[in-house]
Image (cartoon, grey):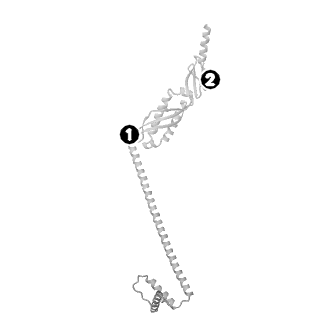
Amino acid sequence: MVAIILILIVLVVLISNIKIVPQAKAYTIERLGAYRGTWQTGLHFKIPLIERVARRVTLKEQVVDFEPQPVITKDNVTMQIDTVVYFQITDPKLFTYGVESPMAAIENLTATTLRNIIGDLELDETLTSRDVINTKMRTILDEATDAWGIKVNRVELKNIIPPKAIQESMEKQMKAERERREAILVAEGQKQSAILVAQGEKESMVLRADAKREAQIKEAQGQAEALMTVQKALADSLVLLNEAAPNDKVLRLKALEAFTKAADGKATKIIIPSEIQGMAGLATSLQEGWQTPSPKE
């Protein structure tokens, strides 16, 4: 019975000292208080009572967000800046034995480095030089943490909080700038609108002038065609009259008809040549003769 108990105790001890290191982890091992080695991913056996796991270290990239730190710029403006540090443990042994509290050490180192960098910059430079500050801090922190087995990959300024009075002044300045840009945009819009209206009026005037000119041309062409038609008809009548070889009486009668048409009932007095006056009497006699009925036989 005792043997069974002893065997069970031995099995429990052996099983409890079998360690499996997961992916992206590393264990630092001590034997009798001294560093023995670093276990990587896989199955390992720890000697009972002699060896122990000093620290379980994660090898993945880690992110730590530090509280806002008060810093003073070159022009004596106090502001609050909080930072975010991305780091990765590259040497588990140095991380375990290099510094007592790595996170506190990184936080203090970040705060002092930030104060040194901001102290050389003025307020405007601080607000507009985030990339420069991030690069300088990453370089300084990476060099300082090499002895701790830590590699700093990135440092980001999360928030830069200036004093309230400066914030109000900046807001007023931004508001004035927005109003100025708005005024410029409104003026440009009005200018473009006026230009478009003027162009529209100009095009309208051009179209009206073109339409009037076309109407005048059409009217002149119509009058010219009408005059040509009248002249052609007159010429044709003269040709026909000439071909008919009229005598003097017919010519005088035609002249009388022309004077009658010229009067058109509107003239009160017409001077007729003497040679046509005789024809007028003849025409009257002929007309009366045509209207008088002939006597019955």
Query: Residue under circle 2?
Result: 43
Picture disc at residue 184: none
- Point 38% across, 39% down: residue: 164
- The CA span between labels 1 and 2 is 58 Å
In this view of the protein, which residue sits in the foreground, 273 or 287? 287
What residue is disc 1 on?
A: 164
> Which residue is at 45% across, 84% downward?
260
Q: Position of residue 156 (x, y in %)?
A: 49, 37
Question: Which of disc 2 and disc 1 is earlier in sequence?
Answer: 2
State the image coordinates of residue 107 (x, y, percent, origin top left).
47, 31
Residue nearest the observer in this picture, 247 or 39: 247
Q: Secondary structure at mark 1?
A: helix
Local SS, label 2: strand
Q: Is residue 296 above or below residue 192?
A: below
Circle 2 residues within 10 Å: few <14, some 14–19, many ≥20: few
Residue found at the very far left of the displayed protein:
165
Looking at the image, is 74 positioned above or below residue 208?
Answer: above
Task: Where is residue 228? Give x, y as percent.
Answer: 52, 78
